[in-house]
């Protein structure tokens, strides 16, 4: 007789209340018959290569094991529940990673737009500054042109005045005519003529 294991004791307790199809009713509670059934049960499990507390194929033995099947079903449900939780956790992690990627992209886009906006503002400021410089340069060129024209005109007037004064001095020296005092006050050329010896005369 094989060694009685924990599973054998479990089978003895479990099947002690069930009628055995291969035994008569009066032999149900006899210990030798129960031990033989338990040993047969263990041997069938070994032959089928079943490990742990999984029930052997009840179709081969004709014996139903509802509690063992229920226990196995509960374990399967627990395994499915664990798998479902792990799947949800992985799914949440993937969603968080995807959201983080989207957030990073949004931040990068905002940073790019901000940099682009800053560049555009700087370009606009440069354009405004360039326009101001061009306007100031045009104004300066215009002022310089006006100043040059004024200087040129003044030079022409001075040159014409000097020529007229020179002619007047030459004529006065040639004729020895007196120089009016009023003209002498405001005419440097006549002053020079007076210094050269021309007489003065008061205007009436």
Image (cartoon, rainbow, N blue to C red):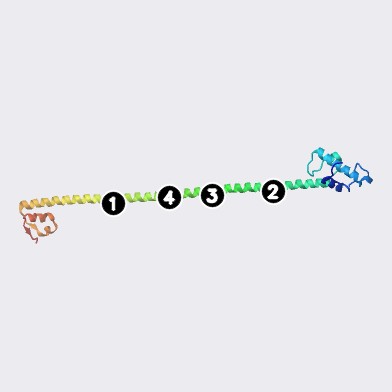
Please tell me which of labels 2 and 3 falls first in the chain.
2
Mark 2 and mark 3 in contact? Answer it, CB < 8 Å.
no
Report the mark closest to the observer, 4 or 2.
2
Mark 4 and mark 2 in contact? Answer it, CB < 8 Å.
no
Q: Residue furthest bottom?
A: 204
Report the mark closest to the observer, 4 or 1.
4
The residue labelled by disc 1 is 143
**Residue drawn at (5%, 52%) of the image:** 175
Quick one: label 1, few (<14), some, or many (20+) residues within 10 Å?
Answer: few
**Residue drawn at (63%, 48%) of the image:** 93
> Disc 2 and disc 3: Cα gap in Å?
32 Å
**Up/down of 182 relative to 86, above or below:** below
Image quadrant holding the N terminus, namely top right
Which numbered dot is residue 85? Answer: 2
Which numbered dot is residue 122? Answer: 4
Report the mark closest to the observer, 2 or 3.
2
Please tell me which of labels 2 and 1 falls first in the chain.
2
Mark 2 and mark 1 in contact? Answer it, CB < 8 Å.
no
Report the mark closest to the observer, 1 or 3.
3
> Disc 4 and disc 3: Cα gap in Å?
22 Å
Please tell me which of labels 4 and 2 falls first in the chain.
2
**Up/down of 74 relative to 200, above or below:** above
Q: Secondary structure at mark 3?
A: helix
Q: Secondary structure at mark 4?
A: helix
Report the mark closest to the observer, 2 or 1.
2
Which numbered dot is residue 107? Answer: 3
> Disc 1 and disc 3: Cα gap in Å?
53 Å
> Disc 4 and disc 1: Cα gap in Å?
31 Å
Q: Position of residue 160 (x, y in %)?
A: 16, 50
> Disc 4 and disc 2: Cα gap in Å?
54 Å
């Amino acid at each position: 007789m094989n060694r009685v294991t924990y599973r054998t004791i479990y089978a003895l307790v479990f099947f002690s209340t069930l009628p055995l199809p291969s035994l008569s009713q009066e032999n149900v509670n006899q210990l030798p018959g129960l031990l033989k059934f338990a040993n047969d049960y263990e041997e069938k499990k070994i032959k089928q290569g079943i490990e742990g507390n999984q029930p052997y194929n009840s179709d081969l033995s004709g014996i139903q094991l509802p509690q063992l099947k229920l226990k196995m079903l509960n374990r399967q449900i627990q395994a499915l529940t664990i798998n479902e939780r792990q799947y949800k956790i992985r799914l949440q992690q993937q969603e968080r990673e995807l959201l983080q990627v989207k957030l990073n992209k949004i931040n990068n886009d905002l940073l790019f737009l901000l940099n682009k906006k800053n560049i555009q503002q700087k370009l606009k400021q440069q354009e405004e500054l360039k326009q101001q410089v061009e306007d100031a340069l045009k104004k300066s060129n215009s002022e310089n042109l006006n100043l040059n024209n004024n200087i040129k005109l003044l030079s022409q007037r001075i040159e014409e005045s000097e020529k007229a004064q020179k002619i007047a001095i030459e004529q006065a020296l040639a004729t020895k005519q007196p120089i009016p005092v009023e003209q002498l006050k405001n005419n440097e050329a006549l002053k020079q003529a007076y210094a050269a010896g021309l007489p003065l005369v008061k205007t009436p």
